[in-house]
Amino acid sequence: MSCSMRSSLSSSCVNVLLIVSLMLLSLSADAYKNYTVGESTGWFDIQEKPSANYQKWADSKTFSLGDFLIFNTDSNHSVVQTYDFKTYKECDYNNNEDNSTTQWSAANPSATSPVPVSVSVPLVKEGSNYFFSGNYDGQQCKFGQHFMINVTHGQGLPSPDKDDETAPGPGQSSQSGGDDDEVAPDTIVPANFDHPKDIESDDDDSLVKGRKSSSSITKYNLLCLVLLGFMASFF
């Protein structure tokens, strides 16, 4: 075999290895995650749950587009999401002047007995996302029921199917409120992206560490494979 043919074959092998490595790396990306807000504490103000510290909980997580926040609460506490810091700071859902705020679940203070409520909120916009309970003139918010997060791009939102329509706004939880036409701003979401089905949970720290370790090992092995193929091209 001539040197030119050997060089051509080696180059082809390197190209194949690079393509395969890139494909495997893309498959190794983390899945979308569910985050249970407050975990076992649920979503309540500190008068009801003195140990609640939602900002501390949020600061220990990394959030990306396509992830879900799960709020386990009751019908006396609401779930409000806003992109407006002023609305968040004033704990006033009624103070928003545009479509930057969504009330995913409204409280029912007149109810004699609160009922359990689980609210699933998709993260569909990058940057600062603010959450609070907006009822009782903002008292629940002022008593610790609030937090802010930064949402990164991550994998981005899942691509809609050809037959899909744009996605749901508020009202997908078991208890919901607000204007049916109100949706998260600047967002196009697949119609089937309204419930956190088959999405990886990130509440188990040991599972997270194991997944990250496995992903790192996989990427290291792929890098070694590429380097070996590159070295082989010189022989």
Image: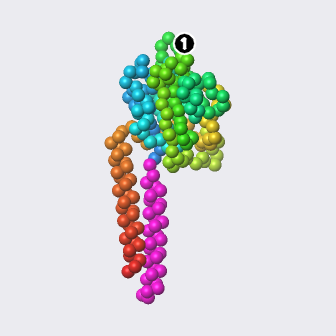
Q: Is 13 situated above or below 181?
A: below
Residue 25 sits inside the magenta stretch:
yes
* Residue nearer the viewer, 94 or 233: 94
Which amino acid type is shown beneath numbered disc 1?
Ser
Q: Is 85 situated above or below 234?
A: above
* Residue nearer the viewer, 63 or 91: 91
x and y, in percent, of residue 195 in the image: 52, 36
Q: Is 135 situated above or below 127?
A: above
x and y, in percent, of residue 17 in the image: 44, 68
Q: Report the predominant secondary structure element of the magenta stretch.
A: helix
Residue at the farthest bottom position: 2
Q: Name the residue under label 1.
A: 110
x and y, in percent, of residue 201 in the image: 42, 40
Q: Which residue is at 37% across, 54% downward?
A: 216
**Image colouring:** rainbow
Q: What stretch is highlighted in magenta?
A: 1-30
Quadrant of the image for the N terminus?
bottom left
Question: Of helix, strand and loop, which one carries label 1?
Answer: loop
Residue 198 appears in the rendering: no
Q: Residues within 10 Å of mark 1 (few under 14, many from 20)?
A: few
Residue 127 sits inside the magenta stretch:
no
Q: Which residue is at 66% across, 31% downward?
A: 98
Quadrant of the image for the C terminus?
bottom left
Quarter where residue 35 is shown: top left
Left or right, 193 with reference to 199: right
Left or right, 44 with reference to 186: left
Q: Which residue is at 66% across, 28% downward?
A: 97
Quarter where residue 208 is shown: top left
Residue 228 appears in the rendering: yes
x and y, in percent, of residue 25 in the image: 44, 58
* Residue nearer the viewer, 107 or 163: 107
